[in-house]
Amino acid sequence: LVFTQTDRTRRIGDEERARILAEPGFGQHYTDFMAHATWRLDEGWGGAEVIPFGPLTMSPASAVLHYGQEIFEGLKAFRHADGSVWTFRPERNAERLQRSARRLALPELSVEDFLSSLRAAVAADEHWVPEATSEESLYLRPFMFASEEFLGVRASHKVEYYVISSPAGPYFPRGVQPLVVWITDEYARAGAGGTGAAKCGGNYASSLLGKDEAAQHGADEVLFLDSETHTSIDELSGMNVFAITTDGRLLTPALTGSILEGVTRESILQLARDRGLEPVEQRLVMSDLLEQVTSGEITEMFACGTAAVINPIGEFRAHGGTWTVADGGSGETTLALRQELTDIQYGRTPDRHGWLTRL
Ligand code: COI
């Protein structure tokens, strides 16, 4: 696909943009342009364009509004000190979008077309990529949905793909501070054979009530356990979970099909191996883990994702009690991993794994 742009009229003036970039928060502001393409059953992908960011006009009978046939991705554009703009492992997001598409009966977009869409979106909005001096980035949100005007239940014959962009600071309003995590015994995020491994809106919709429950208990996030036995850890509402032990193991739940295969998750496993930690992907029983937190065998825990990067977990809460991880602060290794990952992303340290792609 070649994404062409005819209208280059900016929506937001320089002054307002500077104001937004001074404190972007997360997911609150959008750039001037967006990339778009349409898929039709009989034609495949076409109509690739970059257009001004703005409301979509669609039929109230669009399939996505009824049956939720939708998937998305999240990645970031980082400015380096020399002014160049890069993104992190975009081919992994492209491949995951393809896996999500297969699960949600949506058409696949080639890795090449996915990269073209990112390049086109960021080229049009280059002026929105925050300066290298900040810990900010331009969050890219590619997404795809069923746009056929049809109320029968089957895969849509028409699909829209967009990339919108949003300048991003810290994901959590409090910044990179230890999280309080509520362990829900009521809700599950995804079940066996379901869509848990796909990045589809439905998984996030199913997490919302759990997140509300967490907030009612003064927590920042909710931890979901497996839907079948309610004993082992799946993930948070939109992040993977890790634990570090005194004997140098880095524990994270194995990919069982009900959790998201995070790009940040995979990168952390590699960076941990590089620094001599032993990465262990296995079923993690929550009660065992909490025992290890209490005994001091687990010294650090953290959450990770593209949006949140790496965020320490300071405390767990559940109906049965409260568990503080070590002294409830930010773990040393957690912060070191975060520093190393962001140093790579912002070009402050050599990209030894070849993870960066210039946009
Ligand atoms: C991301 O980390 O990019 C996500 O898509 C998760 C969402 C909670 C923002």
Image (tube, rainbow, N blue to C red):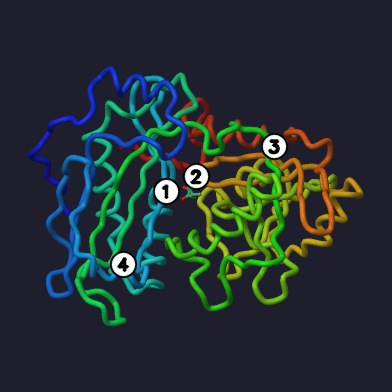
Circle 2 crowding by C-alpha within 10 Å: few under 14, some 14–19, many from 20: some
Amino acid at circle 1 = Gly
Q: Residue at x 84, y 49 (%)?
A: 293
Q: Nearer the viewer, mark 3 or mark 4?
A: 4
Residue named by callout 1: 74
The image position of residue 260, as x and y in percent, is 53, 60
Q: Position of residue 73 (x, y in %)?
A: 40, 53
4 vs 2, front mark: 4
Label 2 CB sits under 8 Å from any ligand 1 atom: yes
Does the Cβ of the disc 1 residue fall within 8 Å of ligand 1? yes
Q: Which residue is mark 2?
A: 306
- Count of numbered circles on the image: 4
Q: Residue furthest front?
A: 216
- Viewer-nearest residue: 194 or 344: 194
Looking at marks 3 and 1 on the same chain, the residue that comes earlier in the sequence is marked by 1
Q: Are marks 1 and 2 in contact (CB under 8 Å)?
A: yes
The answer to whether the residue bearing label 3 lies less than 8 angstroms from the nearest atom of ligand 1 is: no
Secondary structure under badge 2? loop
Residue wearing tag 4? 64
**Disc 3 from disc 4: Cα separation:** 37 Å
Which label sits on residue 178? 3
Mark 3 and 4 residues: CB-CB less than 8 Å, in contact? Answer: no
Q: CA distance from mark 3 to mark 1?
A: 23 Å
Between residue 125 and residue 246, name the one nearer to us.
125
Pointer 4 and pointer 1: residues touching (CB < 8 Å)? no
Q: Quadrant of the N terminus?
A: bottom left
Which amino acid does the dot numbered 4 rest on?
Val
